[in-house]
Image: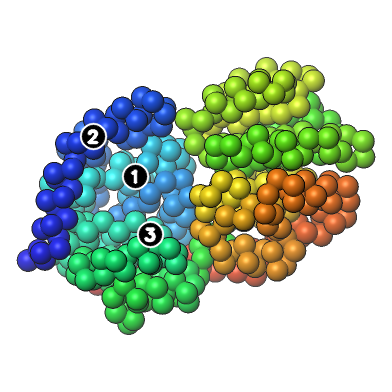
Amino acid sequence: MASVSLWLYRVLFSGLLPLAVPALKVRQMMTGKKRPRFRDRLGRRLPGLATGGVWIQAVSVGEVELARRLVAELGSRAPDLPLFVTATTATGLALARKTMGTTLPVFPCPLDLPGPVRRVLDAASPRLVVLVETELWPEMLHQASTRSVPVAVVNARLSEGSMRSYQRVATPLRSLLRPLTRVLARTEADAERFAGLGVPPDRIEVSGNIKYDLGADERPLDWADEVLAVAGNRPIVVLGSTMEGEESRVLDALDGLEADGEAPFFILAPRHPERFDAVAGLLRQRGVTFGRRTRPGETPARADAFLIDTIGELARAYRLARLAFIGGSLAPTGGHNPLEAAVWGVPVLSGPHVHNFREVYREMVESGGARLVADAAELRVAAAVWLDDTRLASAAGAAGRAVVEANRGATARTAERLLDLVGTG
C-alpha cells in the first residue's frame, strides 16, 4: 500500500505538471535547451522489450557514460540477459542512442507517475531496476517494490549539500526510499550519507567509482587530421564541458601565452548543445578564426580554434591536448569529469568548484595530475608552467593516468552485485 508520503508526492507531481509543461516549453524556446517530448514520456510508445531483464535509468550524459560501461560488463558476464536503458535529458538520450541504440532498446525515462511507470514495468517485467548515481524516483521505487523487483543505485553519490537538503524532509523521505534494495556507493562518505537518510546499513556497500574504469577510446576522430594540420606546431589546449562565461574567462587568461614561441590552439567543447551557437558567436566577437565540427573540411588554414558542436567526442579529443581545462569549475556548478583527460596522460586545470568530483580531484591534485585554481589569474600562471615545460606537463599527465589505473575495478564489482540481485528478482 502506498505511504502517505507517496500520495502527497503524487498529488504535488500531478498538480504541478499542467503548469510545468507549458513553462518548460517556453523556456526551451528561449534557451534552445531541448527536452524529450512530453508524449514520449508517457510510456505509450515503447519499443519492443524482452521480459525478465534489467532496466537501467540514467539522467544525462555523465550517467549514460557510466551506464554504457555497465552494459558492456553485464553483457560480457550474462550475454543472454535482456537490458534496456532510459535517459532523462535530451542530450543523455541522444548519447545513449548513439552509443547503445544499435544493441539494446533506448527510450526516454517515463514520467514518475503511476500510469507511465506501470506501462514500462508491464511491458518489460524486469528482474532488476538500476538507477545511476543520484536520481531517485519515488513512484518508480514504489511500483518496483509492489512487484518484488529489486532496485539498486549504482555509483551512488550524495554530496554534503544534497544531504543537508534531504535532511529537511527526512521523515517523508525515509518512507519513499524504503524500497531501495541495494546502494552501491562510490565512497565511504557517500555510504554514510545514504545511511543518514534512513537507508538500512545492511543494504549499503562501497563498490568504488565506475568513472575510474574508463578506457582510452581509440576510435578515430574524423576531424583530427584536419585540426592537427591547422594547429601545426602549436600546443593544443582543450576547454572541455565549459559552462556559460567560462570560455571568455579562460581565453582571456591564456591570451598571450606561448610555448616555444607558438600561441596555443584551442579546442572548445561546451557542455550543453544549446550553447554551441553562442560560443561560436563569442569566438567571432573576439576575432578568433575557427572551424566547427559540423562543417567538416571548412576549417580555415589560419584558424586558432576548433569548436566541437556535437556530443560524444570530447573524451577522444583530449588525446590531442598538451593540457586541458575542465569546465563547470570556474562557474559554480560542481565541475565535470577530469578522468576523461587523465586517461590520455593529459594534465588537468580546473577552477575551485569541483564538489561533484571531490574525491577524484583530491587524488588527482595530490598526485600532481591536476591543479585547482581560484580564478583566471591563477589559471594563467598554472597554464604557463605546463605550456613552457613539456617535461613537467608530461610528468603531471602520467601522474593523473596512474590515478586512473590505481582505482580500476568498480565496474566489475558492481556488475557482480547486480547479477546477484537479478537472481532474487
For this rendering, which residue is in front, 376 or 198?
376
Which element carries disc 2, helix, strand or loop?
A: helix
Q: What residue is drawn where x is 25% and y is 65%?
A: 169
> Which quadrant of the figure has residue 159?
bottom left
Instruction: Give me the C-alpha separation between circle 3 and circle 1.
Output: 13 Å
Which mark identifies residue 88?
Answer: 1
Earlier in the chain: of badge 1 and badge 2, it is 2
Q: Earlier in the sequence, mark 3 or mark 1?
A: 1
Find numbered disc 1 in the image and state the secondary structure of the residue it sits on. Answer: loop
Task: Identify which residue, 425 or 13, lies in the foreground.
Answer: 13
**What numbered label is drawn on residue 134?**
3
Which numbered disc covers residue 21? 2
Disc 3 or 2, which lies upstream in sequence? 2
Q: Which mark is residue 335?
A: none
Circle 3 SS class = loop
Name the residue type under label 2. Val
Task: Look at label 3 and name its amino acid.
Answer: Thr
Q: In the displayed structure, does residue 342 sit left or right of residue 179?
A: right
